[in-house]
Amino acid sequence: MSQAQEPEASCQCGRSFPVRLEQVGGIVNCPSCGQAVEVPGLRDGMWTGLKVLAAIVWAASIAAVYVHHGMIPALGTAVIVALMIGLVSLAS
């Protein structure tokens, strides 16, 4: 059985170095040259898609509360509101 590959970052100076799991998706300084380096991972396409999906589900649940309390007259309107909020979060 193989061990999971440790995350690593690559700097423009040519050095690759390991990073801690909590640093994935963040920015760290290169130990060789001190330049800021973005650690790949959480900003990858799959994670972006999951973030958008989570935002849409969250918006739909908020819209459902509004419908339940009669603040939005129709479920169709709630769905439109949820999709608009999801698209706004996608753009940001």
Image (tube, rainbow, N blue to C red):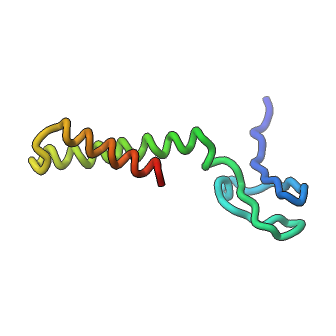
Judged left or right of residue 66, residue 59 is right
Q: Position of residue 86 (x, y in %)?
A: 38, 46
Residue at the image point whose x is 11% and y is 49% from the top: 69
Numbered disc total: 0
Q: Is residue 45 left or right of residue 91?
A: right
Which residue sits at x=33%, y=46%? 84
Q: Nearer the viewer, residue 49 or 80?
A: 80
Q: Position of residue 89 (x, y in %)?
A: 42, 51
Between 81 and 64, the residue placed more toward the observer is 81
Q: Is residue 34 left or right of residue 40?
A: right
Quarter where residue 77 is shown: top left
Which residue is situated farthest in the top direction here?
Answer: 1
Q: Nearer the viewer, residue 57 or 5?
A: 57
Residue at 23% over, 46% down: 63
**Taking 41 as reference, is 19 above or below it?**
below
Q: Is residue 91 above or below residue 74?
A: below
Q: Quadrant of the N terminus?
A: top right
Residue 64, given in percent of the width and then of the height, sits at 21, 43
Which percent across, then down, holds residue 40? Answer: 70, 50
Residue at 83% from the left image edge and 57% from the top image edge = 11
Residue 46 is left or right of residue 85, and the answer is: right
Of 42 and 7, which appears nearest the observer? 42
